[in-house]
Amino acid sequence: MNLAARYEIVDAHKFPRSGAFVFSPNHYSEIDPVVMGVVAWKLGRLPRFLAKASVFKIPVIGWVLSRSGQIPVQRGGSVRGSEPVKAAQRLVEKGQIVVVYPEGSLTRDPDLWPMRGKTGAVRIALEQGIPIVPAAHWGTQQLMPRYSKKISLFPRKTIRVKIGDPLDLAQFRGRSLDTATLNEATAVVMVAITALLEDLRGEKAPTKRWNPSEHNQKETGRFEA
């Protein structure tokens, strides 16, 4: 990965060097977990992922993820050998970081902006009492475009990453973790991620976040199908 890309990390000092937290980046390429894993490693932490089980079927990438202790999540919500929250709890008890993509799948937005978020990341953060650290990356699509299975190694790519301020979601603690609360907290996270990506791209994201259901797109699989 170092041969394939150089990494420019902005605000690296905001990345906690110890303690448990949920690390939540944007998601638009199937190689994102490897890219963000490299970033976390460069910043001194070994991440654990709750990632789609389908990613583990990709040659080489899947082997690396399995061997490094990542956690495959079935689309139905189950985790091989455990439930997602129980798996996260074990990692939290060890003071490790859990990488969860709030979008739940590769963005369907035509211009690769973050789409609507799902509640898994904030549920873990609120149930475990740990912060969420938002992040954004840009340039990964040059290494592996959305839905591609081919990695472009040459010429060497530049991937820019920006780390956001930790979100402790204090205003939501003590509230019932019902759908309304989780959706409200997720919106806070998605706003933070989108703002970071706007800074990296030097552009403004669409005013309305892309929602697959409003465009007759499936929640899983390739949106072109």
Image (tube, rainbow, N blue to C red):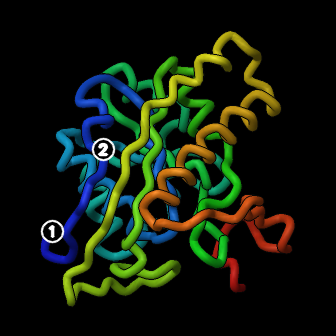
Q: Position of residue 166 (x, y in %)?
A: 44, 31
Badge count: 2
Please, what secondary structure does the residue beneath circle 2 have? loop
Residue at horizontal 51 percent and vertical 20 percent from the top: 128
- Looking at the image, residue 129 lies above or below residue 81: above
Residue at numbered disc 1: 2
- Of residues 15 and 83, the one nearer the viewer is 15
Q: Which residue is mark 2?
A: 11
Q: Residue 192's image quarter?
A: top right
Q: Residue at x 51, y 23 (%)?
A: 168
Q: Nearer the viewer, residue 71 or 5?
A: 5
Type of amino acid at the residue the image marks with label 1: Asn
x and y percentages locating residue 77 in the rendered image: 64, 47
Q: Position of residue 65 (x, y in %)?
A: 32, 57
Compared across the picture, whether 120 is left or right of 168 comes to right
Residue 111 location in percent, x, y? 60, 76
